[in-house]
Image: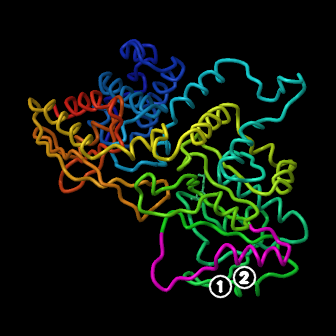
Amino acid sequence: MSCSTISVRAIPAVGRVLRALGEVDLPQSVVVTVVRRELNRLRRRVVACDVADGKLVAEATFEAITERVRISLGDLQRSRLRPVINGTGILIHTNLGRTPLCASAVTALAEVAAHYSNLELDLTSGERGGRAEYLELLLAQLCGAEAAMVVNNCAAALVLILRHFTAGERKEVVISRGELIQIGGGFRIPEILESSGARLREVGTTNRTTVEDYSQAMGQGTALLLRVHRSNFFMRGFVESPSTEALAALTLRRRVPLVEDLGSGVVMDLEELGLPEREPTPASVLKRGVDLVCFSGDKFLCGPQAGIIVGRAKRIAALKREPFFRALRCDKLAIAALQATVEEHLRSDAGDLRLPLFERLRSPEGALRARAEALMVGLVDVAIEIRVGQGSAQVGGGTLPAVTIPSVRIELLPRAVRLGEFADRLRRASPAVLGFIAGGRLNLDLRTVFPEQDSELLRAIRNAAG
Ligand SMILES: *Cc1c(COP(=O)(O)O)cnc(C)c1O
């Protein structure tokens, strides 16, 4: 093996590659970095002479180099944060940004983002004001709570609570073995607990924990009793856990706070939405005697990423005094969007909430079917076989795992491209289209596609199938 036919001098200059690329919709310095990286990689390979001569010569042609740079730039452009069309049928999709915001939240976001705001100024007195005071009032109202506060996300809420209550002599957090759960990627309750300086005191078994189990485990070292809602899975069969009322009575007697992590933050009556499920709401849990409840802002609440803590005024005030709270506080954009979202909840009943998630949930199957048929008509001249099928959407985002929502999907089988290639092309389109492969076809569930995206969806399918 010899590398005699190619030398480092044959590698083109950065400027020549840049000229060949023409206009690229990325900052110029980023493009230059990508070109340099590609040329350096080639230079190292030439010096090391690590592949057969002929192959290296082929890779070192000007055309091959510019093509590789173009591919890298395309990957980079696609990795910019941007909207995608969700045809997965999963309504709260963590990888796709959980829930879209409602129109009033988007307006509030844009207005506050583009201007100065009264973030920490009391406009009545002209004095310095508290951040998010109005939002806290709204959240307390929504949850029937004495007080509320917001932090960066529900994980942060839990960390703040754990650190606060385990800062003193008492370090133990009592929790049922049935609730030592993992939520999404990398969020495990035992790890969060230990990283907060708390000591885990497990009680009961995976499927059964009684009040006596809790009671026997509590002692001088107990800092708090934590309940974690099993939001992303369900257990059936020989299962027992104490009522919230019983635990509230126990913790009241022992003078230990009772905290519940509800996660999904269902604040409305799910039956009004036609969902056959009952989820504890923050209001119902507080009424049963829990001291503090935390939940996510961007799951069922449909707001921006945030963690909400509601409960006893004295406890909330103490949490807000924690120096660590400063590191977890929300920015003005999250506050603006959450404020508008909570106002929307307070203005409407569950049945007519103008929140995108609920509008998608409410869309009748007939309407979805009509859209599917219109898409079919729009694709008659394309080399693709298309069927309208029964879909089953899911809430997702680690909430209501047992619920499936009747839906309609289009099932696509391109004639001119392989299925995997077709799926790749759709995902790499602009806007990107995400579906799922099942039954040898690419399926797009229309429950999670907004009707106003149908024309873009049609265009993407046409292009990808060609
Ligand atoms: C989703 C979830 C969390 C994490 O919420 P983030 O807002 O994503 O940090 C915590 N606890 C429970 C029970 C959850 O379902």
Question: Residue 128: where, in percent of width, then height?
Answer: 88, 28
Residue 243 lies in the magenta-colored region: yes
Asked if disc 2 and disc 1 are in contact, CB closer than 8 Å, the reply is yes
- Image check: 302 left or right of 150? left
Tag 1: residue type? Answer: Thr
Question: Residue 103: where, in percent of width, then height?
Answer: 51, 30
Can you tell which quarter of the image residue 293 is in? Answer: bottom right
In the rendered image of this protein, does residue 232 appear above or below residue 57? below
Can you tell which quarter of the image residue 336 is in? Answer: top right
Q: Which residue is mark 2?
A: 214
In the rendered image of this protein, does residue 124 appear above or below residue 185? above
Tag 2: residue type? Answer: Tyr
In the rendered image of this protein, does residue 177 appear above or below residue 194? below
- Closer to us: 26 or 381: 381
Provide the secondary structure element on which disc 2 rests. helix
Residue 428 lies in the magenta-colored region: no
Q: Which residues are magenta?
A: 234-258
